[in-house]
Amino acid sequence: MSGAPVRLLVVGAGQRGTWYSRLAVRTGRAEIVAVAEADPARRAAFAREFGVPAERTFASWQQLADLPAAGLASPAATTDLADLAAKTGIADPAAVAGPSAGRIADAAIVATQDAMHEGPAVLLAGLGYHLLLEKPMAPEEGAARRIAEAVTRAGVIAAVCHVLRYTPYTAVLKELLDSGRIGRLVSMQHLEPVGWWHQAHSFVRGNWRNAAVSSPMLLSKACHDVDWLLYLAGEPVRRVSSFGGLAHFRADQRPEGAADRCLDCAIEHECPYSALKLYVPLAQAREPHPNAEPVPWPLSVVSADGSEESVREALRHGEYGRCVYACDNDVVDHQVVSMELAGGGTVSLTMTAFTPLEHRKTRLFGTHGFIDGDGHSLRVVDFRTGADETIDVAAARAGDHSDGDAGLVAAFVDAVAAGDGSLLHSDVHTSLAGHRVVWAAEKARLSGTVETL
């Protein structure tokens, strides 16, 4: 691309879409040139922040189907228009990729809600956009497969946002395993500590509370973890079983005297899941200023401006002020997954709400050694020498303190600029394989079976 900045279109200007956009701009090698977002206030705020002109702001992704190419090359490949129209829900096949249809950017970030990924992803791939797709790919396998097929037909670069692959911690751990430091990897034990208040925020009151509306929690929260464990193992899963359920956040666990809203609750002060305890102190800590930093997560999900007044108003009338025992949630708050790898190794994953919100914790058991990691450091025990070493990841990667989000976005920008998908740690087909493990685990949990992939 001759050193020109990578031009990005963003579909879905919510928390993740906005965050990935900021990270892309911070690389100094990308610019945001267009946005498609249904919510007018969110769309306007995004356009202001990134300087997107009015003619490049769209109320829906469907409006992108028939735009002039703005000086960009034609799409990388054509698609079956009738098939593509059927997948995107656009009635007129010619409007999907007709003679005048083109790209207004080099690549697109698709960060809509889980169930809304398929339409824009299939359309944009067909038009030749490279894709950065928020995880999960889709709530069900058919939609995810159609996305992967569209990417293959178009020949575009595409990655799902499995950001755990891109952390400095992962890089050090992967090097240890690949170098044979602990011999052959035999088993892994992994904890995903969701966090008590994070569960209440996202998976009881929030957008991912109900599997029919979003996806099963194992997919929405822990497909990261399954993808990461398979990345470390370097081999596919053969069989999977799972157990878990909704133990606490339900009506029969409601304490006596609890009200439907935290603002009205006589026992709110003693409840660990109080919305007042979570959101109001965050609002009070923000100093009102016209040049203040953007409202941080999770406050940004509750209130656009982050003021205490607007937060209290949202808790009075919105979803985030509801009692956690009086919501329409049905996703699990605890789950264990057991996996048998193709080579005979085993993996156990525990996902639970009842923890602090911390880094994942992982133990890896090899024929010649043992690794115990907490997201910050790695304890490595060598059975051959008896050496017991602790590796501080920050020190091992001096000068590189970026997190996985930043690492992924930087790698994607580099890959698009170079036209080289190998600069990414995975592709949509790798992600689809990990998703299939998640769907099999959820089937096993619901049916009490052992599923073979």
Image: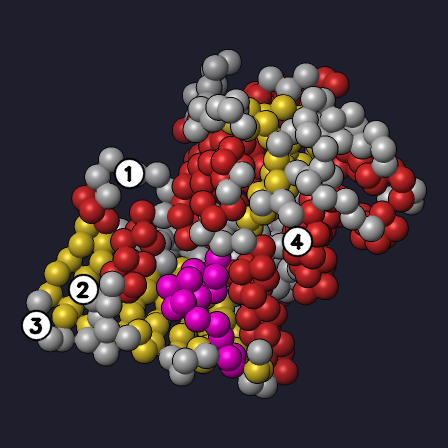
Percent of width and height locating residue 9: 64, 31
Label 4 and label 3: CA atoms lie apart by: 49 Å
Mark 4 vs mark 1: give the one in front. 4
Percent of width and height locating residue 198: 48, 51
Q: How busy is the neighbourhood of tag 3: few (under 14 within 10 Å), some, or many (20 plus)?
A: few
Q: In this image, 241 relative to 138: left or right? A: left
Q: Is residue 16 above or below residue 293?
A: below
Type of amino acid at the residue the image marks with label 4: Thr
Type of amino acid at the residue the image marks with label 1: Asp
Q: In this image, 152 relative to 425: left or right? A: right
* Residues drawn in magenta: 224-240
- Residue at point 21% right, 66% down? 181
Mark 2 vs mark 4: give the one in front. 4
Q: Which mark is residue 380?
A: 2
Q: Earlier in the sequence, mark 1 or mark 3?
A: 3
Label 4 and label 1: CA atoms lie apart by: 33 Å
Q: Earlier in the sequence, mark 2 or mark 4?
A: 4
Q: Earlier in the sequence, mark 4 or mark 1?
A: 4
Q: Is residue 243 above or below residue 427?
A: below
**Residue on which the image places disc 4:** 152
Label 2 and label 4: CA atoms lie apart by: 41 Å
**Residue on which the image places disc 3:** 386
Q: Is residue 340 magenta?
A: no
Q: Secondary structure at mark 4?
A: helix
Label 2 and label 3: CA atoms lie apart by: 10 Å
Label 1 and label 3: CA atoms lie apart by: 31 Å
Mark 4 vs mark 3: give the one in front. 4
Q: Is residue 52 above or below residue 335?
A: above
Q: Which mark is residue 400?
A: 1
Q: Earlier in the sequence, mark 2 or mark 3?
A: 2
Q: How busy is the neighbourhood of tag 2: few (under 14 within 10 Å), some, or many (20 plus)?
A: many
